[in-house]
Image: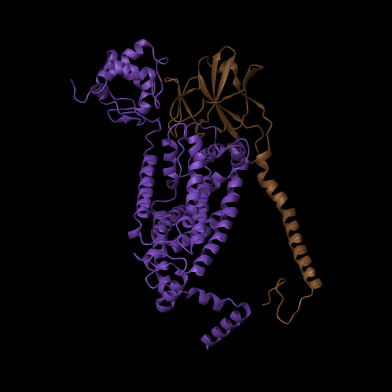
Chain colours: A brown, B purple
Amino acid sequence: MKEPNPEPAAPGCPVTPAELSRRQFLARLSLAAGGTGALIVAVPVAGFILAPFFERTKEVWRSVGKVENFKIGDTTAVQYEDASPLPWAGVTARSAAWLRRVNADTFIAFSINCTHLGCPVRWLADASLFMCPCHGGVYYADGTVAAGPPPLPLPRYPVRVKDGQVQIQTSPVPITS
Amino acid sequence: MVKRIFNQVWNWVDDRTGLLKMLGETARHLVPPDAKWWYVFGTATLCAFMMQVLTGIALAFAYIPSASEAWSTLRFINDTAPFGHFLRGLHYYGASAMILMVGVHMAQVFLAGAYKFPRELNWATGVLLLGFTLVMGFTGQLLRADQNAVWTVVVAAEQAGRVPFLGSWLAHFILGGNTVGGATFTRFFAIHVFVMPGFIFAFVGLHLWLVLRHGVSEPPQPGKPVNPATYRQEYQEMLHKTGRPFWPDAAWRDLVFCLAMIVVIALLAGLAGPPELGKLPDPSIVEASPRPDWYFMWYFAVLALLPHGTEQYLLVYGPLFVGLVLIALPFLFNRGERSPRRRPWAVATVFIVVVAIATLWRAGVKSPWSPNFAAQPLSAAIVGATNGPVLVGAQVFQTKGCLNCHQVGGDGGQRGPDLTAVADRLTPNLMILRIANGGVNMPAYAANLTPAQMDALIAFLQTRKSSPP
């Protein structure tokens, strides 16, 4: 097995300066050719994999029920579909929020994601508290932190009433940074 | 006759490939004579990995990595496919074994000082392999594609979100978008099945090459420190004097141990079975109690127990610091004593790490910090009253969520102190003070209770004494 060995010349094989520069050129050519080829493949591969880094989905309003379905003062979990789910998303396309009807035409929508690490908080109606099942975070009814590790209040989602329907704007999972 | 044909074929293949003799020589490389049962854990890790590759390939014959179908294909694998249930079990306990063995291997190498000169890069590649193994464990849990998987992705994204500057981008990358959805599972499938195994194959190759290059480290002897100037020469002399061929003098122990490990894995897979599939991966079901698999349970406890306010920093810099320390270790301490008898700090470190992980693991399993959503209503016997303020107070205690975090008479949550005998230690005034103002881990109830409710609650709590009055 003979290895190509451009730099030190084999004994009995004197290298002229012309030959040396030719080898240098060929070595550089090979590296450049290989590198360029790899780059041509790497750009689409990296772009495809990293695409979610740069994608920003357009958020939409989703109806979650008629206004009169919600009792004033009550906080209930509402489900809705993400902004633009992939056809094969199945049940993962669903999202939820805690919706409270404050008065006749004011609603608040709280994220279900705890600001500590994102677990789904549960509303305990009688206790007027949100409790997180993971690491013991607790929030007051207004979403401010009552106890445990959460660093921030529960985020709120945009909510509006349109044509008698309560609508929530789809939102990214809130990421505490 | 048969033997002659076999020899001819053998020689022909060796002549044309040039591999057989080389492989034979590699297998018979010399190892220290007293490298015995302490040296089996690296091979055991590799063996568990090979098992994961095989069982994983088999599972991939039926598994569809799509958010809408992964769960039902797992149901099929688990409930219908021949050997499916067993195979899932093998893959799960194989993963468990791989993580366990990688840990034991690491502890053994650390205790024996085998990471010192000239084997610094053996250790460093091993640390990377540990990282890849943990990523495999994590992504594998996600591919179970149940409700737990969804929340595991979210928890991972939230942790990545704490990285300075890049956080929200990284979180977005992990989720594969704004939310958990169709893009999430395919990405983790590719990482679990192609990317990480590729890295593992490559680095196992490098790791083994380094083992062959520097030889298996001899068992440490107290009073024989590593001196980089003379170590290699002494090691070679020792090998030539007393070395034994790896195959079969040492290899038999590796293979016997691997067999025992596989038998245990198979028994667990057959008897205990794979982990149950949870609910559908629907992120809108708020009734969830996300928990990681056992090998991350200790870290789950870390996340709950970090002092409030420090997790901003520790979530990111903690793991980074541990990783850097592990990689840097052999470069900082590459000479000197190898024997654990002369390295009390090394022994203490392993002891402390093992005890810490075991303690945290236990805490994670019990998760006393989680509210108990399934607490049973207090029984009449425990309440001890059928009317009046004590009964009303007991009802307030239940409806206001006190029972979710406090025990009374053996039921309830464990977040806060057990209140079974709270009247022994707190006067009514102190009780009111604490209930109204709350604390670090307790909500303030001042605005949440009417004066009448507070009075009833205090009346109930005042009857909580160790011995009946």
Q: Outermost residue toward the front?
A: B229
Q: Residue at x 48, y 50 (%)?
A: B325
Q: Position of residue A172 (x, y in %)?
A: 61, 32
Q: Quadrant of residue B201?
A: bottom right
| A66 relative to B418, above or below | above
Reply above or below: A5 against B355.
below
Left/right placement of residue B60 relative to residue A25 reads left
Q: Residue at x 54, y 84 (%)?
A: B7
Number of numbered discs on residues: 0
> Which residue lies most toward the bottom here?
B1
Q: Residue furthest right?
A: A18
Q: In the displayed structure, would residue B453 be above or below residue B108?
A: above
Q: Which of the image's four quarters has the C terminus of chain B?
A: top left
Indicate the position of residue B71 as horizontal and vertical percent values: 54, 44
| Picture quadrant of residue B281 | top right
Q: Position of residue B392 (x, y in %)?
A: 32, 15
Specify whether residue B17 is in view: yes
Percent from the top left, x then y, of residue A123?
47, 25
Q: Residue at x 38, y 12 (%)?
A: B450
Q: Residue at x 40, y 30 (%)?
A: B371
Q: Quadrant of residue B9?
A: bottom right
Which residue is more in the foreground, B352 or B259? B352
The answer to whether residue B392 is visible is no
Is the residue B121 above or below the residue B286 in the image? below
Q: Is residue B375 left or right of residue B230?
A: left
